[in-house]
Amino acid sequence: MVGFLIQIYQFIPFLFQIYSWILIIYILMSWVPNVRESQVGVILGKIAEPYLSIFRRFIPPIGGMLDISPIVAFFVLQFVQRGVLYLFELLIRALL
């Protein structure tokens, strides 16, 4: 049981890194016209947009153009990753 939890603990940063890259690519796609409407853009949008929309509800664009919500989303994602890793550390230590 503990060995399985350690494997999950080691895999968690990889999952968060993949999701971070998905967010980065999706955000950069907004700089190129019509790329988000491509098949890859639609798939990435289905993955990234639910998370980003949480922050867009509370953080309006600055000057109507500059959307800083992805920056906040990245910070929150890092805090969540650290929190999940900390909880796994506590769980693993409790089972040892």
Image (cartoon, grey):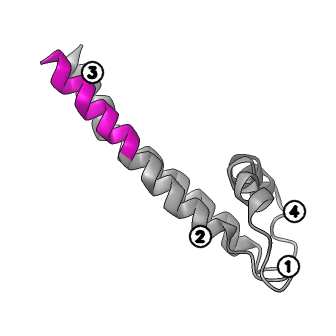
Q: Residue at x 28, y 24 (%)?
A: 5
Q: Which residues are magenta?
A: 83-96
Q: Dividing the image into 4 quarters, which one contains the N terminus?
A: top left
Q: Residue at x 12, y 18 (%)?
A: 96
Mark 2 or mark 4, earlier in chain? 4
Structural distance between the alpha carbons of marks 3 and 4: 40 Å
Residue 49 — which label? Answer: none
Can you identify the residue that label 2 sits on? 71
Can you identify the residue that label 1 sits on? 33
- At mark 4, the secondary structure is loop
Structural distance between the alpha carbons of marks 4 and 1: 9 Å
Mark 2 or mark 1, earlier in chain? 1
Residue 78 location, quadrant: bottom left
Q: Is residue 52 magenta?
A: no
Residue 8 location, quadrant: top left
What kind of secondary structure does the magenta stretch mostly adopt?
A: helix
Mark 3 or mark 4, earlier in chain? 3
- The amino acid at mark 1 is Pro
How busy is the neighbourhood of tag 1: few (under 14 within 10 Å), some, or many (20 plus)?
A: few
Mark 3 vs 4: CB contact within 8 A: no
